Structures are given as structure tokens and as C-alpha cells.
Image (cartoon, rainbow, N blue to C red):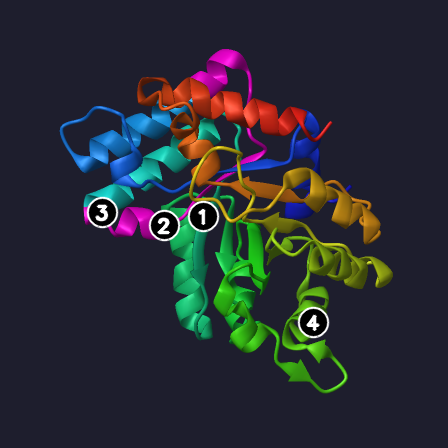
């Protein structure tokens, strides 16, 4: 099998035994970790979670830090982000940098260098709405990293543009899906929200019927008892993919708040690391 992002992801999921993506979105008021600064608290919080994963040999398939949550803290927090990416990759955990980039060609090339060379991420999220010359610098980067293009998102405002009717293409996001097939070189995936199961099934079928499945990054998976989730159910999402004819096991299901702040379910902030990994393990077990 060719050494593409898609095949590497499929092997990673098989090796670790689950398709869970741990979102890493720091919200300071919810971080119980001790530290002399916001940056130190963030670093300790995610370092403790990683240490607990290693201690128990329970790992997510991938992790996904959203750069906005670090940018809004301070410039120094971006150095924390870079350190965390390095630390998680040292444990062989692939890192998706959720930055939703996209610009004219030369600017996209600079963004790609930032994601893959400066931060050292294995993949990045991008907006495809400026077209091929905007996505191309990410997709054809010399380091051959992964690229997740926004296809069908789960936010309320998604309907403003993604649902617009397009002649002979149903809705606009299906026109994007056709382009993703055209652009795919083995390193391209799509962001598809977890909250509309019928659409998940239909989108899967769209790719399966064209014999060109691509990996989905699926945000919106919730953990019972933890506030802040979008309400997506992991088991139901995987069932929808199977119903749509999906055969390849390279889709990852993201939970951010539900895993990060699992301590809220039992109100035990001192156990934030162990409770995060407990929730991760339960979520993984529920899929078998």
C-alpha cells in the first residue's frame, strides 16, 4: 500500500484499536492544572493527560489542537502549542492542527510551511472555498502531510452557503465533494460534522459510489454528563458510515470538551487526567 496520509491513518487506527480524535482546546476556566501562568497551566494539563495515556497504554488515534484556543491566550501560548505537538508526536500520536487555513497560492504555501515545518503537525484543516490553487500548496507540500478540507460542518450557520442549491449538483457541499475527489492524491480528507446522521450516510455514499473514499475528520462527538458537546453519538456515526457503503477504517471521531473536561461529570477536578483517559477508554470500548 502506498505511503499516503490515508493509508498511514488506516494503519494507525488499526494499531491503536480505536478511531478517536482527542481535541485539545484549552479553556482556562476549566483547566484545574496548577501553574504560575496560563501557558504553564495549559502545558501541564495536556502533559498530564499524555503521561496518563502512556502509563495506561490507552491512546487516541490522533489529537487535534485548535490553534485559536492558543492564539487567544498569548503569543507565548503558541510556543506551548508547538511543544505539545512535539511531545504527542514523540509518543507516535499523529497531530492534526485545526487552523482552517486557505488563501491565494503563495499565502497558502506560507501557511503550509507554518503548519508542517514550524509547528510540525502531521495534518492541517483547510477551507476549500478559494479553489485548487488555495488547497494545492498544502496537498502538494514536500513533507506529504495530511489535509482535511471543510466539506459539511455541524455549526448552525453552515446552511448559509453549504446548503445553497447548485445546478445539477444538489447542494453546494456536494460540488465541493466532487472537487475533493478530483484533487485527492492520497493525502486529502474531509471535515464532516457528526450531528446529522442522514447527511453522514449520504456523503459517505457519494464517495463510495464513485469508488473514491476519503478519510473523514468528524467533530461534534459528545460524552454523556459533560457539558459543551455538540450532541453527536460515536456509535451512530459509524453506523451511518457503514450504511452509506463506507469500507475503509480511516475516519476519526473528534471529542474535545467531552474528553478534556470529563472531570465535570463527577466534579472531581483533581483527577482531570485520569478521568479524561477513562472517558477516552469508554468511548473506544463502546465502538467494539
Could you give the CA–CA distance between mark 3 and mark 1, rounded to whole angstroms? Answer: 17 Å
Q: Can residue 7 be seen in this view?
A: yes
Q: Which of marks 2 and 4 is in front?
A: 4
Q: What element carries label 1?
A: strand
Question: Quick check: 24 left or right of 190?
Answer: left
Could you give the CA–CA distance between mark 4 and mark 1, rounded to whole angstroms? Answer: 25 Å
Could you give the CA–CA distance between mark 1 and mark 2, rounded to whole angstroms? Answer: 7 Å
Considering the image in quadrants, where does the N terminus appear? top right
The numbered mark at residue 67 is 2
Mark 1 crowd level (few <14, some 14–19, many ≥20, 10 Å Cα): many
- Magenta-tinted stretch: 51-75
Q: Can residue 4 be seen in this view?
A: no
The residue indicated by pointer 3 is 73
The residue indicated by pointer 4 is 174
Q: Is mark 3 on a helix, strand or loop?
A: loop
Q: Is residue 63 magenta?
A: yes
Q: Earlier in the sequence, mark 3 or mark 1?
A: 3
Could you give the CA–CA distance between mark 2 and mark 4, rounded to whole angstroms? Answer: 28 Å
Amino acid at each position: 500500500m502506498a505511503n499516503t496520509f490515508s493509508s498511514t491513518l488506516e494503519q494507525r487506527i488499526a494499531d491503536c484499536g480505536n478511531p478517536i480524535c482527542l481535541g485539545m482546546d484549552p479553556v482556562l476556566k476549566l483547566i484545574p492544572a496548577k501553574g504560575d501562568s496560563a501557558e504553564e497551566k495549559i502545558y501541564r494539563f495536556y502533559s498530564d493527560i499524555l503521561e496518563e495515556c502512556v502509563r495506561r497504554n490507552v491512546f487516541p488515534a490522533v489529537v487535534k489542537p485548535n490553534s485559536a484556543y492558543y492564539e487567544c491566550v498569548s503569543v507565548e501560548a503558541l510556543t506551548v502549542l508547538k511543544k505539545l505537538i512535539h511531545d504527542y508526536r514523540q509518543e507516535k500520536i499523529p497531530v492534526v492542527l485545526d487552523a482552517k487555513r486557505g488563501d491565494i497560492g503563495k499565502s497558502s504555501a506560507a501557511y503550509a510551511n507554518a503548519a508542517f515545518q514550524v509547528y510540525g503537525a502531521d495534518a492541517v484543516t483547510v477551507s476549500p472555498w478559494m479553489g485548487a490553487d488555495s488547497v494545492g500548496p498544502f496537498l502538494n507540500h514536500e513533507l506529504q502531510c495530511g489535509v482535511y478540507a471543510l466539506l459539511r460542518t455541524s455549526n448552525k450557520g453552515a446552511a448559509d452557503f453549504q446548503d445553497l442549491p447548485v445546478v445539477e449538483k444538489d447542494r453546494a457541499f456536494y460540488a465541493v465533494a466532487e472537487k475533493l475527489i478530483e484533487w485527492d492524491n492520497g493525502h486529502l480528507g474531509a471535515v464532516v460534522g457528526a450531528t446529522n446522521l442522514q447527511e453522514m450516510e449520504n456523503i459517505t455514499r457519494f464517495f463510495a459510489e464513485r469508488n473514491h473514499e476519503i478519510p473523514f475528520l468528524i467533530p461534534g462527538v459528545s460524552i454523556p454528563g459533560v457539558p459543551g458537546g455538540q450532541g453527536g453519538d460515536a456509535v451512530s456515526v459509524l453506523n451511518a458510515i457503514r450504511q452509506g457503503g463506507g469500507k475503509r477504517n480511516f475516519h476519526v471521531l473528534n471529542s474535545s470538551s467531552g474528553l478534556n473536561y470529563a472531570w465535570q461529570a463527577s466534579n472531581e477536578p483533581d483527577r482531570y487526567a485520569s478521568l479524561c483517559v477513562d472517558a477516552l477508554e469508554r468511548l473506544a470500548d463502546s465502538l467494539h
